[in-house]
Amino acid sequence: MKKITLAAITALAITACSSGPQFRVDGDISGADGKMLYLEASGLEGIVPLDSVKLSGDGSFTFKQARPESPEFYRLRVDDKVINFSIDSIETIKIKAPYAKLSTDYTVEGSVNSSRIKELTLKQMQLQSGVDALFKALQANKMTNDIFEDSLSSLIDGYKQDVKLHYIYSAPNTAAAYFALFQKLNDYLIFDPLNNKEDVRCFAAVATSLNNSFPHADRSKNLYNIVIKGMKNTRKPQAKTLEIPEEKIVETGVIEVALRDVKGSVRKLTSLKGKVVLLDFSVFQSPGGAPHNLMLRDLFNKYSAQGLEIYQVSLDADEHFWRSSADKLPWTCVRDGNGVYSSVVSLYNVRQVPAVFLINRNNELKARGEDIKDLESAIKELL
């Protein structure tokens, strides 16, 4: 086997000295004659290559690596096909898979956590497929925007409840629970540790369990840092009597919003008078953020020439993430650093995100999302 010396040196942060106790991964990848199989570590800083072998004949392979000091994550990769697994101690894991369906049809023996990681991977794939199907239906005009949003929310909420119950809270001290926290949908974390209070609790449960067993592990420390940030961002401020400043209310009855966009310029909601405005409150760094923005882009592309404008208020805790995500958007996008506890959110009585409101050309608030049966039709009526 070809050892990747530089990568092995880098991997010292993850693994112990190679002369000490080791774990072993063997098995076979059928239908991959002549292809390279890579063993890689999934570290906090990214993927680190550890070893490789050229497959031949029956596709059998064996890898040995230093045992990690605390539970760690690894993966087998052929081309762009990946199998994720975890190592908790001196283990021997056997993995068999057909090359054609490497990521879905593999079997794993010798690691309960790795078996549960496979279950989570398949569930995530099913969720992604469901979300993709919804968006295709929306693009094909087979469903309204409102049904799309409701269906999207239902899919994501159902997934999260299932994973919370069966993988996180049922066994927070396992590698599978940790793996569940960092699964993604459209490259966004499904469980949002910075903006969602319930999701922060999931991270806290795993952080506490991991810290009890491995207090000095880098993953333990990193997870606790995430939880602390999340708790700070989602901590409800002391209750105050909400007073609406007179300058926030204009003659037409819409409540003013004046926040900075990605370039630092203050953008006022009322400056869009003469346009039909879709006022949107969103969290970009959430699993539904990308599909929601795709829906908004579809509406904007259809009706901007007729006078539709979007004024989007980001409630993201991570300013850098918001800036990167909003930089290329064709509509007005601002950010409220106070997140879901901002005064603007309270003034508009936003109960959940995403939340939309429609404002007519005279700066009059005409409808809020939960009262709109068909968003596109409602926009067309105002145009």
Image (tube, rainbow, N blue to C red):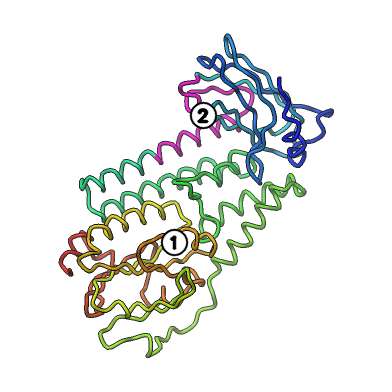
Residue 274 location (% of width, % of height): 23, 77
- SS state under label 2: strand
The residue positioned farthest toward the top in the image shown: 57
Residue type of the residue flagged with mark 2: Lys
* Crowdedness near tag 1: few (<14), some (14–19) or many (≥20) residues, C-alpha within 10 Å: many
Q: Earlier in the sequence, mark 1 or mark 2?
A: 2
Left or right of 284? Residue 173 is right
Compared with 341, 81 (above or below) is above
Residue type of the residue flagged with mark 1: Ala
Compared with 162, 26 (above or below) is above
Instruction: Please give the name of the residue rendered at 67% of the width and 23% of the height, measured from the top-left corner.
Output: 25
Left or right of 339? Residue 280 is left
Name the front one of labels 1 and 2. Answer: 1
Instruction: Please give the name of the residue rendered at 50% of the width and 50% of the height, measured from the top-left corner.
Output: 189
Residue 111 location (% of width, % of height): 63, 27
Compared with 44, 321 (above or below) is below
The residue positioned farthest toward the right in the image shown: 19
Q: Quadrant of residue 117?
A: top right
Q: Which residue is mark 1?
A: 326
* Crowdedness near tag 2: few (<14), some (14–19) or many (≥20) residues, C-alpha within 10 Å: some
The verdict on residue 40 being magenta is: no
* Residue toward you, 51 or 281: 51
Compared with 372, 137 (above or below) is above
* Residue toward you, 372 or 18: 18
Tell me the quarter of the image containing the N terminus: top right
Tell me the quarter of the image containing the C terminus: bottom left
Query: Mainly helix, strand or loop, the magenta region?
Result: helix
What range is drawn magenta here? 99-128
Residue 235 location (% of width, % of height): 56, 68
Distance in Å between CA atoms under marks 1 and 2: 31 Å
Q: Quadrant of residue 82?
A: top right
Q: Which residue is mark 2?
A: 81
